[in-house]
Amino acid sequence: MAQSTHHKNNSVRLIAGEYRSRKLEFPSLEGLRPTADRIRETLFNWLQDSIQGETCLDLFAGSGALGFEALSRGASQVDFIEQNTSAANSIRANIERLDAKHGNLYCADAFEWLDRYTQNSKKYGLVFLDPPFKGETLARAIKKLESTNLLKDGGLVYIEKEKQLKENGLPSNWVEVKSKEAGSVQFGLYNILKSSE
């Protein structure tokens, strides 16, 4: 019986809110690993007072689980950025299936998207940063985000990374609110204070 899973989509279940218990489907792709349920549960417990009406950015969206969980819990808007076409298509399909009118999908490379929207008048109060674990993507993304005008003062950034990845180059105005480890993953929430410059 287990063999058949090879061809079908994977799915994750949303934990709470408007879309509670609804399933999100996403393709089997190397490196695409949705945030584990218990990590999502912990994260959204941390965020419960911060999410209502917030504008969110799911920068390396993958399955879109974090962004959809935010929409489910009352975020006013979530922009999903996903480079892989089949992953992006499944996010689009999930937006339609859930009738998630406040979800916008951009099928684009995260860094190119940030370049293009750096002077956007829109400001994000919550950013999900869960890039592929390999390479320097996280350090590059942190640096890039800090150089844009996209973060609200006092906004929050969620970072998920491999535990052994050293926290390199976190800007001094990104202040850790909470962090935890689960298995080989470390995840944390950071408050973005107004840049001192």
Image (spheres, rainbow, N blue to C red):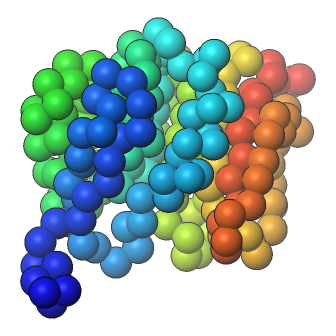
Report the residue at 50% width, 12% height from top: 52
Q: Tell which of 5 and 161 is nearer to you.
A: 5
- Image vertical order of residue 36 relative to residue 118, above or below: below
Q: Tell which of 44 and 86 is nearer to you.
A: 44
The quarter of the displayed image where residue 152 is located: top right
Name, please, the residue furthest toward the front.
1
- In the picture, measured across the screen, residue 172 lies left or right of residue 160, that is right
Q: Tell which of 26 and 134 is nearer to you.
A: 26
Report the residue at 53% width, 46% height from top: 40
Q: Position of residue 171 (x, y in %)?
A: 81, 42
Residue 130 visible in the picture: yes
Q: Position of residue 30 (x, y in %)?
A: 34, 78
Please give the count of numbered marks on the rendered protein: 0
Report the residue at 39% width, 24% height from top: 17
- In the picture, measured across the screen, residue 84 lies left or right of residue 195, that is left
The N terminus: image quadrant: bottom left
- Image vertical order of residue 155 relative to residue 36, above or below: above
Report the residue at 61% width, 18% height from top: 50
- Image vertical order of residue 78 relative to residue 135, above or below: above
- In the picture, measured across the screen, residue 137 lies left or right of residue 6, that is right
Residue 144 visible in the picture: no
